[in-house]
Image (cartoon, rainbow, N blue to C red):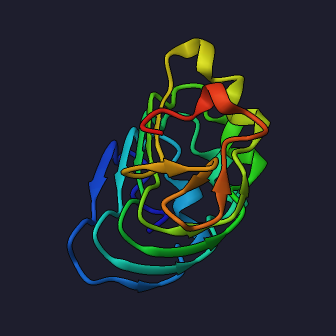
């Protein structure tokens, strides 16, 4: 996977993939679009995601991912769209993501918010409510 250094777009959606996202994806530093939507991915989002500097769109929606979003996601200065709804993430939206808000970042956490709890998965907007669109 790391040998695909020139790859700019990768859509792995709707493939019934399971398991965790391999950390080797961080080697794809020219990747602008990464879609893992509608799979069965589990585990947490690897902190190595922060090394994917060119990433402008990340779609992790409709999986079984858990845990906190890593603060390293805030290092993605080109990120414009983050789709993470319909997972089981917990904790607050990392404040580092809010630094990208000035760059018109759109974060779609789920179909609804109830008491700052996104999609019943335990991800809250309370630490950074301005970061949460779709709430």
Residue 27 in the figure: left or right of residue 63: right
Q: Nearer the viewer, residue 19 or 99?
A: 99
Q: Position of residue 108 (x, y in %)?
A: 43, 42
Rendered residue at 60%/20% (across/down)? 101
Q: Position of residue 9 (x, y in %)?
A: 30, 46
Above or below: residue 17 compared with residue 120: below
Q: Position of residue 29 (x, y in %)?
A: 53, 44
Which residue is outermost to the top? Answer: 102
Occupied quadrant, residue 85? bottom left
Occupied quadrant, residue 132? top right
Above or below: residue 123 compared with residue 51: below
Rendered residue at 58%/56% (across/down)? 26
Q: Nearer the viewer, residue 119 or 27?
A: 119
Occupied quadrant, residue 47? bottom right
Rendered residue at 61%/12% (across/down)? 102
Q: Quadrant of the N terminus?
A: bottom left
Rendered residue at 36%/51% (across/down)? 111
Residue 121 in the figure: left or right of residue 16: right
């Amino acid at each position: 996977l790391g040998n695909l250094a020139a790859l700019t777009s990768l859509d792995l959606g709707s493939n019934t993939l399971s398991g965790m996202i391999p950390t080797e994806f961080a080697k794809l530093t020219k990747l602008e679009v990464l879609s893992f939507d509608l799979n069965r991915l589990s585990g947490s989002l690897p902190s190595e995601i922060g090394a994917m500097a060119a990433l402008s769109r990340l779609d992790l929606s409709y999986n079984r991912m858990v845990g906190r979003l890593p603060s390293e996601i805030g290092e993605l200065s080109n990120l414009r769209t983050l789709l993470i709804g319909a997972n089981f993430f917990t904790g607050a939206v990392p404040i580092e993501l809010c630094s990208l808000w000035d760059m018109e970042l759109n974060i779609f956490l789920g179909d609804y918010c109830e008491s700052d709890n996104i999609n019943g998965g335990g991800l809250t907007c309370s630490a950074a409510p301005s970061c949460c669109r779709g709430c």
